[in-house]
Amino acid sequence: MADWQKITGGITAPRGYQAAGITAGLKPSGLPDLALIFSEVEAIAAGVFTTSQVKAACVEYCRQRLLAKPSARAILCNAGQANAATGNQGYLDTLESSLAIAQALNISSESILLASTGVIGQRIKMDALRSGIPKVVAALSATGSDAAAGAIITTDLVTKSIALETIVGDRPVRIGGIAKGSGMIHPNMATMLAFVTCDAVVSPALWQQMLARAADRSFNSITVDGDTSTNDSLIALANGQSRTPAIIEWGAEAEKLEAMLTAVCQHLAKAIARDGEGATCLIEVEVTGTHDEISARQIAKTIAGSSLVKSAIFGRDPNWGRIAAAAGRAGIPFEQENLQIKLGNFLMLENGQPLTFDRSAASAYLKKAATGAYLQEDTVLISVNVGNGYGVGKAWGCDLSYDYVRINAEYTT
């Protein structure tokens, strides 16, 4: 059993946080497009960002801010324009955004972090942002998580949110999170956009280390289409308002906190993979038998990201040969005669040899997942063993449907 429980409240479940989401006129659709997360006190801040050489202005801004001072009080996120590949003026717009929200909150601009999502190559609509900032500040609420989650999405079909609680010492500690992402999902850092709040007291170095490891086991282990975004950002705040003893070095309490942080990130990551553009089911791949966890995750992510595997799942075709081929090209050495592949409970390959299985029943298993309850009974499980090592790794993806092409063919038109 997990050493925590799920609670309501999302990013405002931890003590000392408020959030808001409003319509500022940034999106052509007229839907909510400006979100604000605010800590009542200065919070330790950590971040993991895209490794793409083409980075949005907000990514460069946040990286510099966190290098200078690993703390913050507010995260402002606009949706509609990515403000990536927008040159010097795009960066100047980012600086203006930070100064404007800092002034409205009456705090230092050094305590502001920023995120953007939308169409690459488009600057933020600054007139709309300027007029929206006072409104989003006025809308801040201790129950504003859902509004914020709704204001950061673009092509998402659903919002993504979670909050968990555990006991540290004799007091409750909470972690909440929201995320957005549906397409351009193949993170090599964290995810599209994800924001996490926590009310524990954690040292800056330890919080950054925890977040990086949690990202590797969650957002860095999902894929929808093999494209890494210019704006990928995972930002986590820890404000200490739980009044628990400070966690400053590795130990039992730090391990418990990191495990809960990882669980929050994994929930959000799976929600993103399941909401892949045009997807009908979630794919979970577990690989065992490698020398280490990193190798297992590499094979798992290669399988989850294979267009042929994803297409077969959408066609309800139990084509294990595509799984074997993806595992073989992952760049991790293993002996072919050790390979085992299972689809759900159907054992298809053992010791590198094909087995007879009920293809109709296996196809029915895939069809059932496509009609299952969201993030409960809609998951296709692929299990792969490659040897006798202790490495275990998971990755998540989704099937590849006709709608993926339609959605992305029409994205800017």
Image: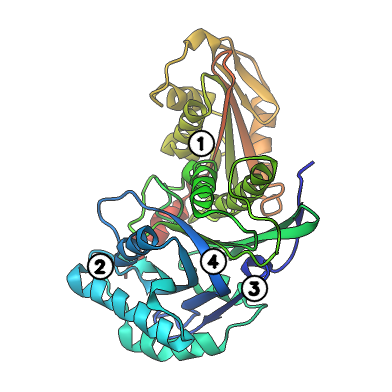
Query: Looking at the rendered structure, which numbered label has been put on residue 121?
Result: 2
As measured in the structure, the alpha-carbon distance from the residue carrying label 1 to the one carrying label 4 is 46 Å
Q: Residues within 10 Å of mark 4 (few under 14, many from 20)?
A: many
Q: Secondary structure at mark 4?
A: strand
As measured in the structure, the alpha-carbon distance from the residue carrying label 1 to the one carrying label 2 is 34 Å
As measured in the structure, the alpha-carbon distance from the residue carrying label 3 to the one carrying label 4 is 10 Å
Q: Please, what is the three-letter code of the amino acid marked with disc 2?
A: Gly
x then y, percent, for residue 59: 34, 61
Which mark is first along the chain, 1 or 3? 3
x then y, percent, for residue 92: 24, 76
Q: Please, what is the three-letter code of the amino acid marked with disc 3?
A: Gly
As measured in the structure, the alpha-carbon distance from the residue carrying label 3 to the one carrying label 2 is 36 Å
x then y, percent, for residue 365: 68, 36
Q: Please, what is the three-letter code of the amino acid marked with disc 4?
A: Ala
Quickly name the residue at label 4: 43
Colour mode of the rendering = rainbow
Q: Nearer the viewer, residue 274 or 390?
A: 390
Quarter residue 252 falls in = top right
Q: Nearer the viewer, residue 249 or 332?
A: 249
Q: Mark 3 and mark 4 in contact? Answer it, CB < 8 Å.
A: no
Q: Mark 1 and mark 2 in contact? Answer it, CB < 8 Å.
A: no
Q: Please, what is the three-letter code of the amino acid marked with disc 1?
A: Ala
Quarter of the picture containing the C terminus is bottom left
Residue at screen point 69% across, 68% down: 13
Position above or below: 328 against 27: above
Q: Mark 3 or mark 2, which is nearer to you? A: 3
Q: Mark 1 and mark 4 in contact? Answer it, CB < 8 Å.
A: no
Quickly name the residue at label 3: 16
Q: Residues within 10 Å of mark 2 (few under 14, many from 20)?
A: some
Position above or below: 51 against 13: above
Residue at screen point 65% across, 44% down: 259
Quickly name the residue at label 1: 312
